[in-house]
Image: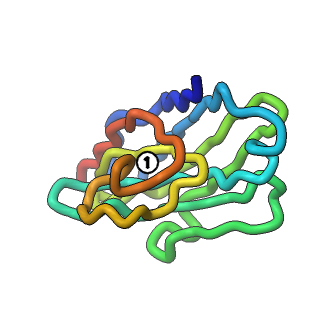
């Protein structure tokens, strides 16, 4: 069984820092070696948005413009862990954060993160709340 388990998150003041971790289990071999690890978030009333993505081989990456210079995604391939270090947090960073492997849009309409709108493997989400 494939499982993604997030930890971390919580509450912080604006300007503070939080760290998220995600343990990936149940994916091995070629499937994992060619996967893309990503962090998404969804704020109330908003669409799911991609925050950061890393290819497992480390050759390609993406970071959302509004978090560049503040958020850093990383991975430890030996232990199948993903991380998102969030610094200089802003109230608009408040959202539920999800880790995902190979999360791509399906043809199912909607606004939420995870299946059925997205394919791939998803964690359950962890709340990040930033107060001003």
Within the image, what quadrant is residue 125 found in? Answer: top left
Q: Is residue 31 left or right of residue 87?
A: right
Q: Is residue 33 left or right of residue 63?
A: right
Count of number-bearing discs = 1
Q: How is the image coloured?
A: rainbow
Q: Residue at x 39, y 33 (%)?
A: 124
Asked which secondary structure carries label 1, the reply is loop
Say which quadrant the N terminus sits in. Answer: top right
Residue 106, position in %: x, y? 42, 62
Can you say whether 46 is above or below 2 in the image? below
Of the pair 70 and 124, the residue shown nearer to us: 124
Q: Residue at x 66, y 26 (%)?
A: 26
Can you say whether 75 is above or below 59 in the image? above
Residue 71, position in %: x, y? 55, 58
Of the pair 76 and 2, the residue shown nearer to us: 2
Q: Residue at x 62, y 42 (%)?
A: 83
Residue 126, position in %: x, y? 38, 36
- Residue at the outermost left position: 45
Say which quadrant the C terminus sits in. Answer: bottom left
Of the pair 46 and 131, the residue shown nearer to us: 46
Q: Circle 1 sits on which residue?
A: 16
Of the pair 90 and 7, the residue shown nearer to us: 7
Residue 130, position in %: x, y? 30, 48
Q: Residue at x 55, y 27 (%)?
A: 3
């Amino acid at each position: 069984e494939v499982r993604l388990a997030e930890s971390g998150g919580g509450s912080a003041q604006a300007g503070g820092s939080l760290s998220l971790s995600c343990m990936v289990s149940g994916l091995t071999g070629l499937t994992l070696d060619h996967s893309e690890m990503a962090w998404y978030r969804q704020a109330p009333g908003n669409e799911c948005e991609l925050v950061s993505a890393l290819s497992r081989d480390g050759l390609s990456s993406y970071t959302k413009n509004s978090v560049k210079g503040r958020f850093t995604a990383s991975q430890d391939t030996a232990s199948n862990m993903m991380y998102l270090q969030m610094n200089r947090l802003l109230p608009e960073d408040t959202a539920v954060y999800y880790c995902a492997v190979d999360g791509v849009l399906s043809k199912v309409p909607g606004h939420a993160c995870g299946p059925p709108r997205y394919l791939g493997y998803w964690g359950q989400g962890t709340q990040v709340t930033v107060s001003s």
